[in-house]
Image (cartoon, grey):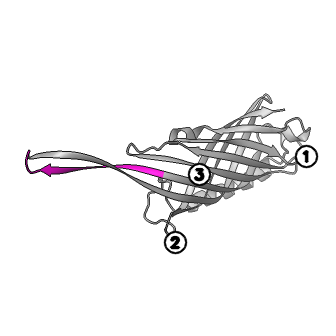
Amino acid sequence: MKKLIMSSLLVLVLGTIGFAQGIKYTKNDTIRYIVKNDVLRFFGGTFWTGAEFPINNRKSILVNGIATYGSTSSNKENIGYGAELQYRSYLGKGRSLTNYPIYLASQFMFRRINSFEQQFSSVLDPISNNYIESESETKSSFNVYYFGVLLGCQVFVNQIFTVDLNFGGGLRLSQVDGQKSFTRYQGITDLDYSGVIPRFGMTIGIIQH
């Protein structure tokens, strides 16, 4: 975690010194918003899409909708919804233009998850002396809250689409229905994990003029 913080500060300092530029697409108000999809989330069974709206030459707001429809585990199925809000501040004073502005963003997220887990067991039948397999399904529902920061770079290609790369970290808090406290002793890859967690994202955007 210390290495992550030090790396973030280093990139932030270098970005402030070397990229003292504005955001190209907001300088002349030629773009209304950018529709975005986080391509990495598809591999985890989540549809993560939204739009970034420029406020001025250095500020923007990104709003995402989240739909969960699967899981990386073979015996577990996650279904849910959520939303994410980012407030982005692009580095520099906005006196010149660039196709690859660097930004620092604060991030807030909420997710509601219903998790269905299949459990298998076997019981010895005393009559046939064979094991009888049985299957059952358990359901748990929980809320996920996340607060963090991101450092990223958005690359503009021919004023048609963008490639947005970012990394950072934050605090995730998960609370199971009926429990007063947040979860403990969960794996960092589980959605119901509570604790500090890193983040890496790559989104593809379509520019809307």
Amino acid carrying mark 1 in the image: Arg
Q: Residue at x 70, y 42 (%)?
A: 50
Q: CA distance from mark 2 to mark 1?
A: 51 Å
**Residue 8 lies in what quarter of the image?**
bottom right
Amino acid carrying mark 3 in the image: Arg
Looking at the image, residue 165 sits to the left or right of residue 159; the answer is left
Percent from the top left, x then y, of residue 25? 84, 38
Classified by dominant secondary structure, the portion drawn in magenta counts as strand
Query: Dot 1, crowdedness within 10 Å: few (<14), some or many (≥20)?
Result: few
Percent from the top left, x then y, of residue 196? 55, 62
Please report whichever mark, 1 or 3, sits nearer to the chain's N-terminal start: 1
Count how many numbered circles sit on residues in the image: 3
Query: Dot 3, crowdedness within 10 Å: few (<14), some or many (≥20)?
Result: few
Percent from the top left, x then y, of residue 156? 76, 34
Out of 174 and 9, give the one closest to the viewer: 174
Q: Answer whether residue 91 is visible to the viewer in this image.
A: yes
Looking at the image, residue 151 sits to the left or right of residue 182; the answer is right
Q: Which residue is mark 2?
A: 180
Q: Residue at x 87, y 41 (%)?
A: 26
Amino acid carrying mark 2 in the image: Lys
Query: Dot 2, crowdedness within 10 Å: few (<14), some or many (≥20)?
Result: few
> Which label lies toward us, 1 or 3?
3
Residue 199: numbered disc: 3
Image: 54 above or below 208 = below
Q: Which residue is mark 1?
A: 95
Q: CA distance from mark 1 to mark 3?
A: 31 Å
